[in-house]
Image (tube, helix red, strand yellow):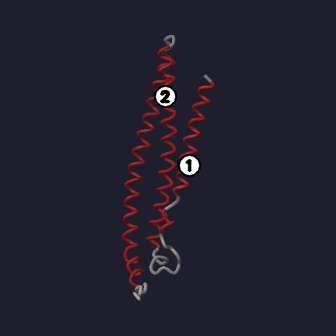
Amino acid sequence: MVRSHSAAVAAVLFFVMTSLASAQAAGDSTTNLDLSPGTPGVAADTSLAREIAMGDSVRAMLAQDDSQTQVDQAQLDSLQSMLKSDRSSAPRAAAVSRDQAAVAQTQHAIHRDLARDKHARTRLTSIEKKIKKAQAPVKKAQASSRPAASSR
């Protein structure tokens, strides 16, 4: 029994580490934005900076929630396996009912995580739209202020 729990814990840790690594590799949204102090309008626009920070915060929260959902899913798989084992072995009503309660609780946690993720993704989409809308005039001004390429 102890070996099966250590294998489940090892699997959970593996999922968490790969999720965190992919989230770090993805980076944040500010890498493709020109936020240098010389950019007209951007440095002074604290609203835009706040929206960008909010977007990064929501992305980090989503990465953490995705990791937690994977952990919960691995735990659910483990609990369902234990429940199946308890049902097939000598009838032990207490163990079966305990496992059923744990499965139900974990399923509820997964559903709650998924609902929170859906809400956060909707919020992130809204934030990204606000950022693009706020940056459109700045990018347009930058494009018009560049000298036209001369043809020879």
Residue bearing mark 1:
20
Q: Toward which corner of the image does residue 146 lie, by quadrant?
A: bottom left
Q: What's the residue at 49%, 58% (across, down)?
A: 57
Point out residue 25 in the picture as x, y percentages from the top left corner: 55, 55
Q: Which mark is residue 30?
A: none
Residue most toward the front? 152
Q: What's the residue at 50%, 66% (across, down)?
A: 30
Point out residue 74 in the picture as x, y percentages from the top left corner: 51, 34
Q: Toward which corner of the image does residue 10 lie, by quadrant?
A: top right
Q: Residues within 10 Å of mark 2 (few under 14, many from 20)?
A: some
Where 145 falls versus 47 (above or below)? below
Where 75 falls versus 41 (above or below)? above
Residue bearing mark 2:
102
Looking at the picture, which amino acid does disc 2 mark?
Ala
The kind of secondary structure element at disc 1 is helix
Q: N-terminal of the two: label 2 or label 1?
A: 1
Q: What's the residue at 56%, 45% (across, down)?
A: 18
Q: Nearer the viewer, mark 2 or mark 1?
A: 1
Tag 2–tag 1 contact (CB < 8 Å): no
Point out residue 67 in the picture as x, y percentages from the top left corner: 51, 44
Looking at the picture, which amino acid does disc 1 mark?
Leu
Q: What's the residue at 57%, 31% (across, down)?
A: 8
Q: Residues within 10 Å of mark 1 (few under 14, many from 20)?
A: some
The kind of secondary structure element at disc 2 is helix
Q: Nearer the viewer, residue 13 or 68?
A: 13
- Horizontal side of 14 relative to 143 (left or right) equals right
Point out residue 40 in the picture as x, y percentages from the top left corner: 46, 81
